[in-house]
Image: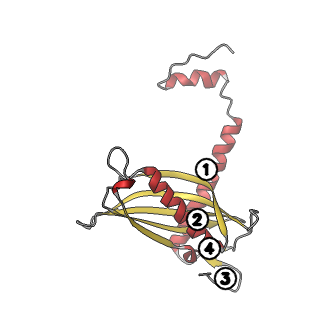
Amino acid sequence: MKHILSETGHRKASASKVTISELMLPSHQNFSGKIHGGYILMLMDQIAFAAASRYSGTYCVTASVDTVDFLNPIEVGELATLKACVNYVGNSSMIVGIRVTSENIQTGVVKHCNSSYFTMVAKDASGKTVTVPPLEINSHTEVRRFYNALKRISLKKERSRHEETFDHKSPEAIEGLKNYRVKLELDKS
């Protein structure tokens, strides 16, 4: 279902909302009996694709995943629910916020298990990036999510600048390692 653009060509953030729920099966568990984090990441990538594609009206690919915090484990037999929404729109990219909860079906207890942000890029049939509709924001929650996305973008750029300019071979960098639990034995080459 294509969501109609406003008269100004903008699309509502709410047009991208997607929710999926899935019963967690024994085949999804890791060696400790909890649901495997990789399986949850796969589901998160799927819902990020769905939200971004729904918003843009085109095929999308994952460009990056920003901080995946596993807050609580998901147990076999619980119902995992993933909710996703576009929080920020650039020219061809979108940041999709994802929240994962699990529900113990027998007790009704719901817990927040995971949150993450996926950057998705819109593509045409030949694989070239395409422009996505500008974002229409309609609630204070959407304003907060947009500004949080801007903050994450800024921090990512700052981290990248630091990595480009940090001299890991400098005497200060080598000396600084003494503050950590490492043993320094550099080879002579």
Q: Which quadrant holds residue 15? A: bottom right
At numbered mark 3, what does the secondary structure look like: helix, strand or loop? loop
Q: Amino acid at mark 4?
A: Tyr
Specify which label sits upstream in the sequence, 4 or 1.
4
How crowded pointer 3 is (Cα within 10 Å; few <14, some 14-19, many 20+) is rated as: some
Q: Indicate the quadrant containing the C terminus: top left, top right, bottom left or bottom right.
A: top right
Residue 35, given in percent of the width and then of the height, sits at 37, 53
Q: Residue at x 60, y 68 (%)?
A: 52
What amino acid is found at the position of numbered circle 1 in the picture?
Leu
Splitting the image into 4 quarters, where does residue 161 fall?
top right
Q: Vertical placement of 6 versus 153: above or below?
A: below
Task: Tell me the mark number nearer the camera, choosing from 4 and 1.
Answer: 4
Q: Are marks 3 and 1 in contact (CB under 8 Å)?
A: no
Give the mark nearer the N terminus: 2 vs 1.
2
Are the residues tagged 2 and 4 within 8 Å (C-beta)? no
To which quarter of the image does residue 24 belong?
bottom left
Name the residue: 65% across, 20% down.
171
Q: Is residue 129 left or right of residue 16?
A: right
Q: Of tags 2 and 1, which is closer to the observer? A: 2
Q: Which residue is mark 1?
A: 155
3D distance between C-alphas at marks 3 and 4: 10 Å
The CA distance from mark 4 to mark 1 is 25 Å
Looking at the image, is mark 3 or mark 4 earlier in the sequence?
3
* SS at badge 1: helix
In the picture, the disc for residue 107 is none
Question: Mark 3: which amino acid?
Answer: Leu
Q: Residues within 10 Å of mark 1 (few under 14, many from 20)?
A: few
Which residue corresponds to mark 3? Answer: 5
Mark 3 or mark 1, earlier in chain: 3
Give the foreground label among 2 and 4: 2
Label 2 amino acid?
Answer: Phe
